Amino acid sequence: MSYYVYMLKSKEKKPVTYVGYTSDLKKRIILHNSSKGAKFTRGRKWKLIYKEKFKSKKEAISREYYIKKNRSLRNKLKNENFNITSL
């Protein structure tokens, strides 16, 4: 089974980001946009701006933690335009 670490950006004037991990990226984004995802994401509309694929849950959790704690990396990912065409 594959796991993904992803970053979402809110569709607001002052956007915020959210970093998470999942084994089903498409389903998870649908949950976030229907206010059934993580508490922080409720009430906002999100777009996927970054994703990475991992072979194990342990690797994905480790990378998620790293991105969440590394503010400069998070801002770099937030401000770059990655071409996320399909899930």
Image: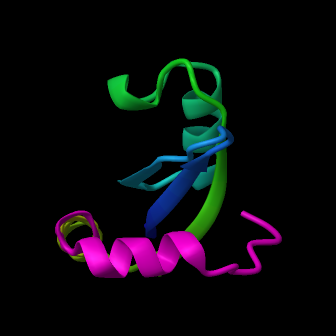
Residue 37 pos. (x, y %):
46, 28
- The residue sitting at 52% across, 69% down in the picture is 78
Q: Residue at x 21, y 75 (%)?
A: 70
Residue at 69% x, 79% y is: 81
Q: Position of residue 67 (x, y in %)?
A: 28, 72
- Vertical order, 4 against 47 (above or below): below
**Residue extent of the magenta highlight:** 66-87
Q: Is residue 53 above or below residue 36?
A: below
Q: Residue furthest front?
A: 13
Query: Residue 45, percent across and down?
Result: 66, 32
> On screen, 7 above or below 83?
above
| Name of the residue lying farthest toward the right | 85
The image shows residue 1 at horizontal and vertical percentages of 43, 67
Q: Is residue 16 left or right of residue 79?
A: left
Compared across the picture, whether 66 is left or right of 3 comes to left
Which of the pair 12/83 is nearer the observer? 12
* Frontmost residue, 47 versus 12: 12
Q: 2 or 10: nearer the eye?
A: 10
